[in-house]
Image (cartoon, rainbow, N blue to C red):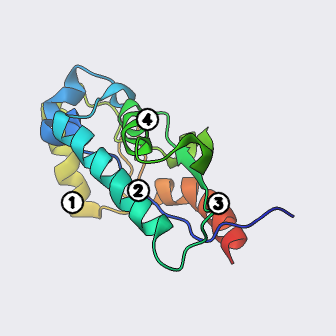
Amino acid sequence: MGVLPKRIILMRHGESQGNLDTSAYTTTPDHSIQLTPQGIQQARLAGDNLRRVVSGEGCSPDWRLYFYVSPYARTRSTLRELGRSFSKKRVIGVREESRVREQDFGNFQVQERMKIIKETRERFGRFFYRFPEGESAADVFDRISGKLFLLESFHR
């Protein structure tokens, strides 16, 4: 058996156009939403912070990183920017993994419809409410929990 990871770190993408203005989803597919300039800076800072965490006191001098990233443009851009903080010898792999993508909120093209749907979700419960043509937070949990459980079991 190979060397098991010392830790598993989950990280979210930097600020995206959709975070700044939800109307971006009416003209751009969710997977194509880009980072804002602030999001790029956040990703670079996250890389610096991550490097300090993994190379800090008490860490092995020959630490390595393996990244899982969703196929969305904003997550790949976040990884590219935070990756600038690491030499190529420190990164032993990158894997695009669609199961770690964001929750699918369905069809965002009609803003007024999404407003009504989000209000309905608040009334019926955020975790179990399934968006039309999308998924619930419970669906997301089910989608990623197998992957996270596998990673956690290797971590022990």
Depth check, mark 3 against mark 2: the one in front is: 2
10 Å neighbourhood of mark 4: few (<14), some, or many (≥20)?
some
Label 2, label 1: how far apart the Cα atoms are = 26 Å
Amino acid on which disc 1 is placed: Glu
Q: Which residue is tagged 4?
A: 76
Locate the C terminus and report the quarter of the image it occupies.
bottom right
Residue projecting furthest to the front: 61
Residue closest to the eye, 75 or 145: 75
Residue under numbered circle 2: 11
Number of residues whose C-alpha sits closer than 10 Å to that of mark 2, classed few (under 14), some (14–19) or many (20 or more): few
Residue at image mark 3: 146
Q: Please tell me which of labels 1 and 3 falls first in the chain.
A: 1
The answer to which of 67 and 71 lies nearer the viewer is 67
Q: Earlier in the sequence, mark 4 or mark 1?
A: 4
State the separation of the CA atoms marked 1 and 3. 27 Å
How many labels sit on residues?
4
- Give residue 122's mark: 1
